[in-house]
């Protein structure tokens, strides 16, 4: 009898559990008419506010889950991809799993890490286990490339003044870059806190404590300068008129 390797069986269970959990989350949300993938977990970038893509297209999400359960992972991947690109954290996590295992998509650990980090930043705590599993693949060059890619993803939301995106960007600078950029992270956490993003104050204060005392005044000044830059490029917040 051919036995499935333990690692493969474990990952298959992980995939099955993830798809089942995603389906359960979706079903509960549709029943309650609440955001499709809302979570109240205490996560790295704060409490997620729900996945808008799943809200907009629950039938697509349900079809993806059904395809995955039926073993048609190619169809599942094709359905998850546009949802993931639109910001659906559960779709991002499931896409990361498919890339990791090479089911429905060619195995690609760089893509798996990218989507796992997108999911993690968006609030999926289970993505951390997958990120940890791929630690050996996360070379400094790959981490830098993923950070650059996610920064580009977040840029439109950041320039629009979305505090949540600023907080996510700060964790790109502390958790994904091979050499953490504490000053840059503080800047975005300070701005995120100013926009009343949940958990931003706690993150800002923790990062501030890690900064060398001699670097703290410059970091605070840079936060003001960054706000002015956002205002100059069209941020329509009342503080722009008041300060600049």
Image (spheres, rainbow, N blue to C red):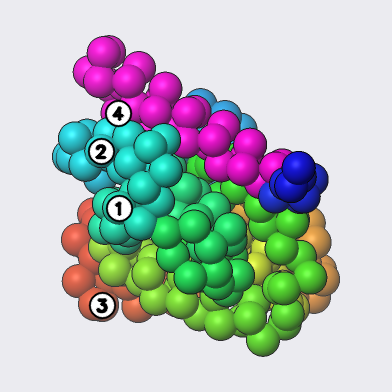
How much space separates mark 1 and mark 3, taking CA atoms? 44 Å
- Residue range corresponding to the magenta coloring: 9-38
Residue position for label 1? 75
Front: mark 3 or 2: 2
Residue position for label 2? 63
Measured from the top left, where is residue 136 in percent x and y? 79, 70
Residue position for label 3? 232
Measured from the top left, where is residue 58 in percent x and y? 22, 34
Measured from the top left, where is residue 145 in percent x and y? 56, 82
Q: Are marks 2 and 4 in contact (CB under 8 Å)?
A: no
- The image quadrant where one finds the C terminus is bottom left
How much space separates mark 2 and mark 1, taking CA atoms? 9 Å
Relative to 143, 89 lies left or right: left
Q: Is residue 13 magenta?
A: yes
Residue 35 is marked as 4
Which circle's residue, 2 or 4, is located before the other in the chain?
A: 4
Relative to 69, 102 lies left or right: right
Front: mark 2 or 4: 2
Instruction: Return the residue nearer the eye: 127 or 166.
Output: 127
Residue at the far bottom in the pictured view: 141
Instruction: Return the residue nearer the eye: 177 or 56.
Output: 56
């Amino acid at each position: 009898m051919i036995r499935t390797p333990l690692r493969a069986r474990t990952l298959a269970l992980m995939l099955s559990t993830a798809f089942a959990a995603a389906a359960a989350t979706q079903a509960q949300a549709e029943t309650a008419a609440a955001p499709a993938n809302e979570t109240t977990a205490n996560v790295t970038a704060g409490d997620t506010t729900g996945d808008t893509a799943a809200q907009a297209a629950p039938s697509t999400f349900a079809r993806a889950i059904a395809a995955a359960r039926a073993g048609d992972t190619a169809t599942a991947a094709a359905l998850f991809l546009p949802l993931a690109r639109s910001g659906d954290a559960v779709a991002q996590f499931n896409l990361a799993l498919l890339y990791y295992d090479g089911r429905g998509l060619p195995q690609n650990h760089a893509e798996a890490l990218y989507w796992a980090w997108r999911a993690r930043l968006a609030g999926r705590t289970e993505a951390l286990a997958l990120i940890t599993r791929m630690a050996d693949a996360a070379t400094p060059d790959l981490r830098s490339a993923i950070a650059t890619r996610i920064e580009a993803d977040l840029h439109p939301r950041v320039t629009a003044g979305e505090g949540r995106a600023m907080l996510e960007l700060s964790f790109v600078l502390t958790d994904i870059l091979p050499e953490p950029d504490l000053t840059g992270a503080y800047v975005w956490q300070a701005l995120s806190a100013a926009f009343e993003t949940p958990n931003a104050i706690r993150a800002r204060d923790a990062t501030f404590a890690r900064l060398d005392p001699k670097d703290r005044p410059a970091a605070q000044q840079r936060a003001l300068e960054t706000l002015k830059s956002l205002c100059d490029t069209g941020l329509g917040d009342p503080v722009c008129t008041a300060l600049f």
